Image: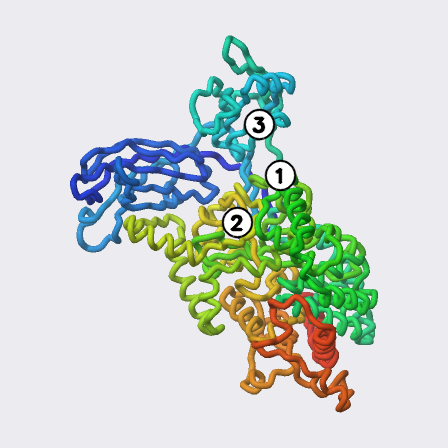
Amino acid sequence: MESTAQTIQEYPVFLLSVRIIKAINIASRDPLSASDCYVTLSLPTASHEQFRTQTIKNSDNPVWNETFYFRIQPKIKNILRLEVCDDDPVTEDDSIFIIFFDLTRVQPGRTVLELFCLRPQKEDSVYKHECLEVEFKLAAIPGPPEHLITNGVLVARELSILEVKVDKVENEKLLKAGKNLVLTVPESYERTQKTTKDLHFFQFHCIRSWEPVLKAKLQSVTYTGDSDSNYPLILPLKCLHVGQQHEVVLPTKNGGTLELHLRVTGWTPNLDVRLGYELCAEEQDFLHKRKKVVADALNKLFNLRRNLLEHEVPVVALMATGGGVRAMVAFYGHLLALQKLKILDCVTYITSASGSTWTLTDLYKHSDWSRRSLELSIKEAKNKVLRSKWDVISINQLKYYHKMLTEHCKNGHLVSFTALWGLVQAACLNDKPKNSKLTEQRIALNEGQNPLPIYTAINVKDKNISTFDFREWIEFNPYEVGFQKYGTYVRTEDFDSEFFMGKLVKKFPESRICYLEGIWTNIFSRNLLDGLYWSSSPEEFWERWVRDMAEKYEENTFRDGYTTVYKPPCSSSGKLCEIFNDILTDRPLKGAAYNFLKGFEFDADYLQQKNFVEWKDTILDGAPGKLTPSEKSLCLIDVGYFLNNSGLPLLRPERNVDVIVALDYDFFNIFKQTEMMAKYCEVQGIPFPKINLTEEDRKNPKECYVFSDEDNPKAPVVIYFPLINCSFKEYKAPGEKRTPAEMNEGELKMSKDGSPYATTHITYCAEDFDKLINLATYNALCSKDLILQGIEKAILKRRSVWLDRSV
């Protein structure tokens, strides 16, 4: 089944029984005695709690016959984790082996007996190996079914929301007496909350089928422990009628009582997170308006005999790479040339990464920027790039950063190095504080008067896993922020607020755009292992990436009915490996944002969904418990740490992009980023033309190249602009040669050593700024015919496809 939009359905809940029968041939980890074994069980899709058997002393063949029960939803992916351990009273308990069991194999009404063995079964008897014998049963539970919302990949489960209110006056009396109220719902998102001077109303978000329980007690305000005992009030939420107000009395010392006002709100299907792979309504409305603008521009540009119909209007996109201030300045030059050529009005999308995002965030402060001359914007940018940056570390400026970060934290946001970096770079490139917000760019889109800007980043693990083993594309635009892999999006103003199971739990004010720029342009978040990958050539990189993906994906994947049994490394060597891995993969200067995917479960068939498979490119995609919905926060970094390329959002089939004008600002490795993009798409099965280059192209690159795939109409035409100085040395404008006195204006130092355009340089002199602007402008102007040919090819393709459909 394939799905693009969310659906709401009802599914019954089942009772799973897991009987831990016995273990066989458990070799003792203690040379002086036999094993003291116990087994732990955890099923995150059914409970936050970890369960364990009793410990069987001095036995290599312990027998337990203990049964544990879980309420499960078979519609979601349920992976049970079993761990056999050796109890050690002196040191840390030894892990003997760990089992991950996909419960898809357990069907209602049938008993499943499994013998999990550490080594693969061969012709010899399994009883020579360390094994665990477990029995599974699944039975239907009487009662109402569970409502589920799914897009075929992620699932939002039915919630019960408990509201608890304490009388403000009574709360103040308790606090004056040195007591506060402690409320705990272990099965909830919030877990435990306490009353304070300003807090006497609480909400707990719980999965209804987990049958959550409220616990309440009073304790000293100075108590800092985490005791889960001595609760005089324990109340199952199922005892409360939905929608009704309930008063419950909590006993206090000296015979007193405290009244709690409780209410459980019913389930509603309205999520605050959008589950669906289709474009949001706002973007579809924008496209309808923009197509009229583009059609009019194309009619004038090509002197068409008749106006283009809406379905005949090609979708043209600009795709800019990163490259620090070099990318920002050259991007201005390319945009200026496209404006002069009357092509800018033909563009529907603009994507940016790293340094090129600075260009867009400045331009979109003006609601009609693409219609007004860009000369003024370039003049403003020049002043920013030329001025000294030493004042960004002055005492007054440091005080300002501290004030802003304190305010950011008070607003509820997570504060990290990325937030500080966002403030610093904003100070480097702006005379005044940058107070604008991403949602304010909607004004520049309300009539379709400008292209839709899309900013890119990647979500990674903050440690233990490299960017090349795990990263997920995330896009930001004025309407939404989201993951195309999961088909999950939030309104831009809600990004970095707290969510659980698709519901907005805590709403925080929208962040200023400088904090987002700190994410998009974070040049400090690479780990050592990333650097080792990037030290290789593109060919070596992809060969290694594909090979590692194949090997590590197998290790981490749980297919239907699949079981993984593995033995953890011994404590000494394992700890050493762990330390070494931490050194290689830790990101000391990482950023953090609240995870709007938190709580979502995976559909039992998510690995069969085409929309997910197309973007399934990490070693963890087959292990749902290790993916982003299980994380508390996102770790977002500059997209350049995997591909210095902002084009992935343009390859969403829903956007149906026909032409990509690729603006590459990496002049040290010409063609590298586009070749890597093409290779990535080939591996993923995403339509994209091959980058076929001759040896002459590599030795003497030209200003512009056009790549297309005539055999695949779904592949976009790619018009590629490397940042190179070719005929610009001799021509100051197309067809206009330089005089001997002007030859110096065509000389740019673009070598690796000593170039003023190095990515780490954030200040240019006026001459270097002008030369870079003029170079980018010239390269686009002299390539007018190639750009028009690419767009014309897209128009013809659109018309022919429509004719084929109508026949």
**Amino acid marked by disc 1:** Leu
* Picture layout, residue 605 above or below residue 332: above
The figure's colour scheme reads rainbow
How many labels sit on residues?
A: 3
As measured in the structure, the alpha-carbon distance from the residue carrying label 3 to the one carrying label 2 is: 28 Å
**Amino acid marked by disc 3:** Leu
- Judge from the rendering whether residue 533 lies leftward or rightward of residue 371; answer left or right: left
On the image, which quarter does residue 425 sit in?
Answer: bottom right
- Nearer to us: label 3 or label 2: 3
- Residue 162: image tag: 3
Q: Residue at x 75, y 65 (%)?
A: 381
Secondary element under disc 2, as helix, strand or loop, is loop
On the image, which quarter does residue 714 sit in?
Answer: bottom right
562 or 646: which is nearer to us? 646
Q: Residue at x 77, y 83 (%)?
A: 733
Q: Residue at x 28, y 36 (%)?
A: 38
Counting from the top left corner in percent of width and height, residue 563 is at 34, 49
Reading the chain from its start, which is encountered first: label 3 or label 2?
Answer: 2
- Nearer to us: label 2 or label 1: 1
Residue 166 visible: yes
As measured in the structure, the alpha-carbon distance from the residue carrying label 3 to the one carrying label 1 is: 15 Å
- Find disc 1 in the rendering and name its residue: 504
- Residue 153: image tag: 2
Instruction: Tell me the crowding category of disc 3: few under 14, some 14 to 19, or many 20 or more residues within 10 angstroms, Cα based.
Output: many
**Amino acid marked by disc 2:** Val
Secondary element under disc 3, as helix, strand or loop, is strand
